[in-house]
Amino acid sequence: MKNTFAAAAFAILLAGCASSANLPTLSLAPEQAVYRLGIGDQLKVTVYGEERLTGEFPVNGQGNVAFPLLGEVSAAGRTLQEFEKEISAGLADGFVNNPSVTVEVANYRPYYILGEITKPGEYQFADGLTVFSAVARAGGFTYRADKKRIYIRHKSGGDEVAYRLEGSTPVQPGDTIRVSERLF
């Protein structure tokens, strides 16, 4: 009986080690690396020579920005350049002659981290954020943390996916990161 239990425990341990070695790494394709606006982003829009049209505007729950003169302008899912062109075209349509518009993200939507870390919660996204820096912001791993795999649910995708934990694993705004407990 003792040998059976020991053999079963050893098999589970080996299965855990083998499965973490077979996990995919997370890297972004060039088209994924292009930032797309989403609900919760805060945008800084500058219209040169038009101070009353310049300011910070949030992307609301419907994915739109309430912009002066234009009303609700669709933002979610667009790149900064696409949104910039939309504002420029709208303003050029009878409001401003040859508008010069720039758009930048003032504050990105947050990411979330939970599980076997010291301070789980919501954190402000920063450009170039990796899983290791996200864990560091959250106070580091607990002693029970599985340091071989990480689970990430992307805001755009549905299911949580396990990845091999590496220093270069990227985090996107709106991601939910989960650090699981190690088996042994």
Image (cartoon, grey):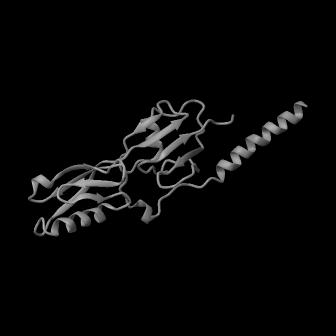
Above or below, 70 relative to 1: below
All told, the count of numbered labels is: 0
Residue 39 position, x and y percent, is 37, 50
Comparing 139 with 50, the one in front is: 50
Above or below, 78 relative to 18: below
Residue in view at x 65 percent, y 48 percent: 20
Residue 4 position, x and y percent, is 88, 36
Above or below, 157 relative to 116: below
Residue 18 position, x and y percent, is 70, 49
Quarter occupied by the C terminus: top right
161 to the left or right of 96: right
54 to the left or right of 79: left
Residue in view at x 38 percent, y 61 percent: 34
Residue in view at x 65 percent, y 51 percent: 21
Quarter occupied by the N terminus: top right
Quadrant of the rendered image containing residue 146: top right
Above or below, 43 relative to 139: below
Residue in view at x 58 percent, y 40 percent: 147
Q: Residue furthest right?
A: 1
Comparing 98 with 34, the one in front is: 98
170 to the left or right of 73: right
